[in-house]
């Protein structure tokens, strides 16, 4: 890796300021994977303390974006083509974590899956996501 | 329909307060469909004026929820099982609208698809979503 | 259109001979859409007369492929990237039909949705599919 | 497990005879998972020796069905609700294998994901699938 999580978070703050303001961060990076965090904030919760589905979707989407960087470099132009999320269990009680792993990186398309859980319960997935990123054509 | 969009929006404000605060609303309701709106707010945009993907996902999810009400009544316990979204074009320039239509309503599962566009350009979909809701078992 | 359904079916017979042998055909073509048919054969059915899910998936996949031809020409190298199918009702009683419609055709990715029904009951969808095709890079 | 792969294959032969005739089998079973095999047959291949996408979809669907048995018993009435497959690499050269793993088993819905590869290359996924099964309501 030729860049750090701090650099990724700086890019996030610049390229997706509302996500940065809402507590999303890049936590770890490795070859073809990333770990992203959503920092718990009570104001976002639904009654009963549930982390909303769209918050989990947003976290999965960011984890995917960060993992793409580990393949193509800090290229903010990669965009989500499609992303599917299945909600498996209620998400309650703390920060949410998402680990994206790239299963196939082609020239124009990157496919990944994302595991999501609440901090402290890594074995109990609250959601699982899958999808594609598309890369801008070279020379564009 | 035995309830109004105002009642749906009151339920939204109570059951998903952060979404209500962020400008999401139920706009219209019909038999097995709904129209939802995200009121443009510049602070959410990404550089270049793009409406973020997770905002569109959240709007699709809410439109689906509202459409489910038209089948099962104002039942806030219906929860998204899975939702998939494909991003088709950049979403820029105004409020976002989502029309959810239920294709199949079974006893425990409701399948719908959602068209999304930016106000003023209904023929140009910016995203398309589809997924399942699961209903709590009767008598639970 | 500079080609006919007969030409598409000739390409199918050559490029996917087992599908051709199993009764799949291109039935109609239009700008950015196609209609495909699976000719009923009792030997494929499951007990009770149900058309199997994988047969419907195969039909959706072919309808998508045919629709792609209407955008890029008779280019057999377009390949399915991903395809999602939701089964909505039991499929019984006759030929199966699938209408694919392209919602977005980009340079490297084509997104479409597919409606599936049993002949004689076009208003009652038995399945709905969505997915992406990827195109070979120009000059490859 | 109170049943064997032989019993599952007998149920397959009875409940999905065309799949059984086309070389699909249950190979292994464990708690919340299964391994399914498609026995290579040249007549099904596409030119170049490619295993067709719908064949891989059918294999994923069967692996999922077998895995469901390990949770609910030999209940042939469980039906696929929706299944999504992403094709990652060309599938060539031998039998295809699919391992389905259940991530969540609820009362009316079971979510699983499926890894697919060609025999001899388990580290190189040719496809990945995920989806939902729905169970008949108790007492029906």
Image (tube, coloured by chain):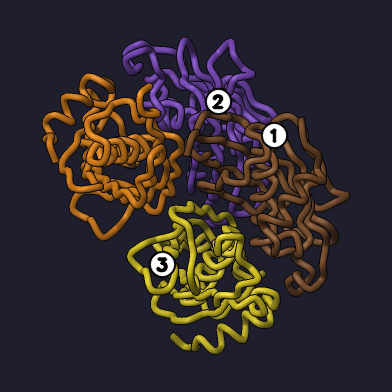
Chain colours: A brown, B yellow, C orange, D purple
Q: Secondary structure at mark 3?
A: strand
Going by the image, does C117 lie left or right of B136?
A: left
Q: CA distance from mark 3 to mark 1?
A: 39 Å
Image point (77%, 50%), residue name: A9
Q: Which mark is residue C102?
A: none
Q: Residues within 10 Å of mark 1 (few under 14, many from 20)?
A: many
Q: Give the residue at the far front of this rendering.
A: A139
- Mark 2 belongs to which subunit? D
Going by the image, does C31 lie left or right of C44?
A: left
Determine which residue is flagged by label 2: D116
- Mark 1 belongs to which subunit? A
Residues C126 and C106: in front is: C106
* Position in image of residue B19 (x %, y %): 65, 74
Determine which residue is flagged by label 1: A70
Circles 3 and 2: CB atoms closer than 8 Å: no
Q: Secondary structure at mark 2?
A: strand
Residues A108 and D133: in front is: A108
Q: CA distance from mark 3 to mark 2?
A: 33 Å
Q: Residues within 10 Å of mark 3 (few under 14, many from 20)?
A: many
* Position in image of residue B87 (x %, y %): 48, 53
- Mark 3 belongs to which subunit? B
Residue B33 position by quadrant:
bottom left
Image point (62%, 24%), residue name: D4
Q: Are marks 3 and 1 on the same chain?
A: no
* Position in image of residue C121 (x %, y %): 22, 56
Q: CA distance from mark 1 to mark 2?
A: 25 Å
Q: Residues within 10 Å of mark 2 (few under 14, many from 20)?
A: many
Q: Give the residue at the far right of this rendering.
A: A120
Q: Which mark is residue B101?
A: 3
Residue C14 position by quadrant:
top left
Depicted A90 relative to depicted A140: above or below: below
Image point (15%, 43%), residue name: C28
């Amino acid at each position: 890796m030729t860049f750090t999580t701090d650099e990724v978070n700086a890019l996030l703050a610049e390229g997706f300021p509302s996500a940065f303001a809402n507590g999303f961060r890049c936590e770890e990076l490795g070859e073809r994977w990333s770990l992203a965090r959503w920092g718990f904030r009570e104001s976002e919760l639904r009654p009963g303390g549930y982390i909303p589905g769209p918050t989990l979707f947003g976290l999965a989407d960011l984890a995917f974006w960060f993992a793409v960087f580990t393949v193509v470099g800090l290229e903010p132009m990669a965009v989500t083509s499609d992303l599917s999320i299945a909600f498996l269990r209620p998400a309650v009680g703390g920060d949410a974590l998402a680990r994206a792993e790239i299963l196939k990186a082609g020239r124009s398309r990157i496919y990944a899956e994302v595991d999501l859980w609440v901090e402290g319960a890594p074995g109990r997935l609250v959601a699982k996501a899958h999808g594609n990123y598309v890369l801008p054509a070279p020379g564009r």
